[in-house]
């Protein structure tokens, strides 16, 4: 018998409807995707883990199964995660990728979790380059060039190579990501507002796994290195030959490393 997928919704603290898909059996794992994507980007990994975990794959606000609000903030995103965690049950694990990794890290400071997995949260991508990226994205959107906005974001944000962007463009996920262009700039701007001080994350005491691609951009590696030096109970796994989208290009590798960490820590 195949997996039984259940479409679910919860109401976040500000009233926004947050949609997610639940499947599998075992301890709960909540997965939070990054920018320029939806829950679909993590279904390949979650499907491979469903024999050992009950996976709750969120569509973050402003996309997919979820609603949105006029104002966006990292606080609201944390409340969205809290609402899903509440339904997932005590001791649920949390995985966050890219901007979703920042959301997950912030949520881990505020709410009880089992274990935490972070895949390259872009904490240090700030300053003039990031501000310029926000301007470029908004400019493209004013010209109704959502495709250009997406390509610009992927090239300058996670710094995907031309080959990686082309490979992404060839998948059905590209057109879905293009539709999300209005959310790109607001998330870059949210990163700009973050303080560079990592000391507050010393509060994140649960066992944490950092996934880092050996071919990822330097600023992503730097952020994870900073977290390795800051978090009290942390280990780093390097994904050989992978960059920022191993969940799409090597889902079996990601699923194996995450499963091994969560099961070994149990």
Image (cartoon, grey):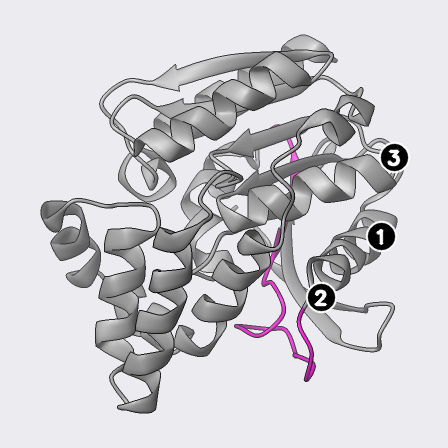
In the displayed structure, does residue 97 sit left or right of residue 83? left
Residue density around tag 1, few if under 14, some if 14–19, many if 20 or more, within 10 Å: few
**From what the image shows, is residue 60 above or below residue 141?**
above
Where residue 15 appears, as percent x and y from the top left, is 84, 78
Residue most toward the bottom?
143
| Sequence-first disc among 1 and 2 | 2
Can the viewer see residue 172 in this picture?
Answer: no
> Is residue 133 rendered to the left or right of residue 100?
left
The residue beneath circle 3 is 112
**Which residue corresponds to mark 2?**
8
**Tag in front: 3 or 1:** 3
Mark toward the start of the polypeptide (3 vs 2): 2
Left-right relation of 129 to 236: left
In three-dimensional space, the C-alpha distance between marks 3 and 1, rounded to whole angstroms, equals: 13 Å
Q: Secondary structure at mark 3?
A: loop
Mark 1–mark 2 Cα distance, whole angstroms, equals: 10 Å
Mark 3 and 2 residues: CB-CB less than 8 Å, in contact?
A: no
Decide: few, some or many residues near mark 3? Use Cα within 10 Å; few <14, some 14-19, many ≥20. Answer: some
Magenta stretch encompasses residue 69: yes
Where residue 38 sits in the image (x, y, percent)? 48, 62
Please say if the residues under marks 1 and 2 sit with CB atoms less than 8 Å apart: yes
Residue wearing tag 1: 87
Q: Does dot 1 land on a helix, a strand or a loop? A: helix
Q: Main secondary structure of the magenta part?
A: loop
Q: Is residue 114 above or below residue 66?
A: above
Q: Is residue 251 visible?
A: yes
In percent of the image, x 42 and y 61: which residue is there? 131
The residue range painted magenta reads 52-72
Element under label 2?
Answer: strand
């Amino acid at each position: 018998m195949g997996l039984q997928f259940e479409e679910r919704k919860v109401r976040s603290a500000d009233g926004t409807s947050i949609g997610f898909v639940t499947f599998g059996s075992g301890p709960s794992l909540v997965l939070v995707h990054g920018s320029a994507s939806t829950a679909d980007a993590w279904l390949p990994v979650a499907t491979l883990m469903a024999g050992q975990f009950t996976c709750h794959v969120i569509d973050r606000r402003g996309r997919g199964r979820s609603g949105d609000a006029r104002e966006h903030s990292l606080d609201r995103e944390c409340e969205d995660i809290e609402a899903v965690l509440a339904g997932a049950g005590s001791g649920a694990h949390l995985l966050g990728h890219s901007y979703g990794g920042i959301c997950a890290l912030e949520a881990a400071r505020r709410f009880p979790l089992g274990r935490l997995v972070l895949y390259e949260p872009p904490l240090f991508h700030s300053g003039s380059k990031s501000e310029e990226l926000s301007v470029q994205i908004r400019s493209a959107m004013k010209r109704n060039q959502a495709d250009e906005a997406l390509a610009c974001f992927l090239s300058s944000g996670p710094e995907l190579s031309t080959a990686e962007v082309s490979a992404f463009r060839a998948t059905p996920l590209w057109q879905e990501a293009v539709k999300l262009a209005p959310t790109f700039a607001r998330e870059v701007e949210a990163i700009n507002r973050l303080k560079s001080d990592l000391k507050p994350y010393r509060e994140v005491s649960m066992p944490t796994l950092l996934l880092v691609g050996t071919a990822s951009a330097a600023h992503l590696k730097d952020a994870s290195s900073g977290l390795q030096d800051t978090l009290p109970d942390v280990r780093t796994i390097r994904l050989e030959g992978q960059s920022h989208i191993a969940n799409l290009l090597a889902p079996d590798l990601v699923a194996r490393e995450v499963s091994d960490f969560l099961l070994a820590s149990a």
